[in-house]
Amino acid sequence: MALIEEVAKISFERVGSHSHIRGLGLDEKGKAKFMGDGMVGQIKAREAAGIAVHLIKKGKFAGKGILLAGPTGSGKTAIAMGIAKELGEDVPFVQIAGSEIYSAEMKKTEFLKQALRRAIGVRISEERKVYEGMLEKIEIKRARHPFNPYVEVPESALITLKTKDDTKTIRVGREIAYQILEGGIEEGDVIQIDAESGRVSKLGTTKEEEGIFLKKKVNLPTGPVLKIKEFTYTVTLHDLDTVNARSGGLVSLFFGGGMEINDDIRERVDQAVKGWIEEGKARLVPGVLFIDECHMLDIEAFSFLARAMEGELAPILILATNRGTTNIRGTGIEAPHGIPIDMLDRLLIINTEPYRRDEVREIVKIRAHEEGIEISEEAVEYLAELGEKTSLRYAVQLLAPASVLAKERVEKEHVEKAKEYFADIKRSTRFVEKLEGMLM
Ligand SMILES: Nc1ncnc2c1ncn2[C@@H]1O[C@H](COP(=O)(O)OP(=O)(O)O)[C@@H](O)[C@H]1O
Ligand SMILES: [Mg+2]
């Protein structure tokens, strides 16, 4: 399990234009508040998403998926993210665009397999025996390097760990002494030493410090120094695949090398995970695979996904598109949203409508707050008006350049200037088309 522990520390998070979304903003009855969890308006779609969450939690959504269909900037991605947040804190949310499957490095199905497995979490809990306490005293015993008599190396150390209720002095070997030295651990720091593996982790310091590189301040632990603690971490099936594919373990995770992930490895990982689940050590946390611009997927990708949804280890599939009737890629067939019928049959469709001015106004305010931009009421009102005429996306996007133009607070004039510099989609296409007309 030590390897998993390492992987758990590598967490990937995409913070960006949706960082304010914390859920769907519904009350206990499933009704949407005008504003809640960072969400504004789009009432019907949010309530529909809430019903889907309810079904998922009850286990009544197997083999089904969700399609979010609506114009650009109507909150499709935001709602998909809200759904994942409603499912739980550590539920994976993986976002890809349909066009990403056409990468040169990987087969389409391999790319999709990896995306699916990144969207399935495994929550692992284990009890471990640890020494935990504040490092009160450390004496390092040094010896000559076995191959180089001019160099001194730590051979062992005598350390005293202290909690509110207990003090213990232990002799530790070279490995642990090294970790303490290399980790810059000093007297006054609170540390944890895994009794089995000898891994040392620094939790913080008990001392008041001054300076730029402040350590995290923690309290003196309570209870005995040697104790049993439960650790919980969530990794994804793809993390486990990656670690298992690298013959050199973690080292090669960072420095390359090792094998490619293949179905054998995935099979082995699945067996191991099932074993852990049966032993009560792990639980599966199915997450969300969100595929934006799903009309870019082709017929092969759709059949692959349809089959994957039947599998026992499947995440929740959420597709999004802004297309009406269009070609199914890879065929000459037209279909609703460019999606083959056998896939459409599995999808609950939620429509997202263009935003009204009062909705745009509140979303602009939330985003300004999130990005730490101070803005006047008048400027917000102007952005709301622009957003209603063009798109929410455009209004939100103008915030950042307007804040560059403003010295302090963003005023209406700064938004006007930003609007001069950066075009919305309609204005930009009209501009290019006019020039094309002149060349004809
Ligand atoms: N109902 C909403 N409440 C709060 N923020 C929203 C809402 N809808 C969209 N947003 C935000 O507005 C921006 C554009 O929405 P997005 O979800 O990207 O639209 P789409 O995916 O339909 O193109 C994003 O920053 C998004 O987080
Ligand atoms: Mg989107």
Image (cartoon, rainbow, N blue to C red):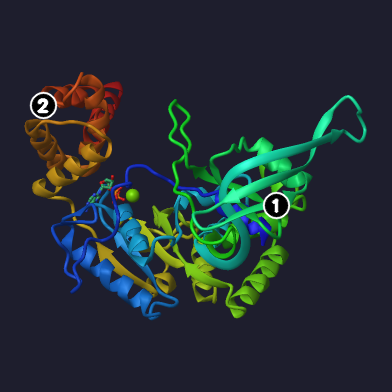
User: Which residue is drawn at the image coordinates 55% and 67% (left, top)?
Assistant: 125
356 shown above or below 341: above
Report if the CB atoms under discs 2 and 1 are less than 8 Å apart.
no
Residue labelled 1 has its Cβ within 8 Å of some atom of ligand 1: no
Task: State the image coordinates of residue 103 (x, y, percent, origin top left).
Answer: 57, 46
Q: Where's residue 190, x and y in %?
A: 54, 46
| Residue pointed to by mark 1 | 170
Mark 1 crowd level (few <14, some 14–19, many ≥20, 10 Å Cα): few
Can residue 109 be seen by looking at this rendering?
A: no
What is the three-letter code of the residue carrying label 2? Lys
Classify the position of the C terminus by image quarter. top left
Report the front residue among 226 and 31.
Answer: 226
Q: Which mark is residue 412?
A: 2
| Front tag of 2 and 1 | 1
Q: What residue is drawn where x is 60% and y is 38%?
A: 185
Q: Position of residue 77 (x, y in %)?
A: 33, 53
Q: Which disc is residue 413 wearing?
A: none
Which structural element holds mark 2? Answer: helix
Where is residue 105, by image quadrant? top right
Q: Is residue 214 visible?
A: yes
With respect to residue 320, does 343 lie above or below?
Answer: below
How many numbered markers are drawn?
Answer: 2
Mark 2 vs mark 1, CA separation in Å: 67 Å
Res 343 → quadrant: bottom left
Q: Earlier in the sequence, mark 2 or mark 1?
A: 1
Identify which residue is drawn at 6% across, 32% down.
378
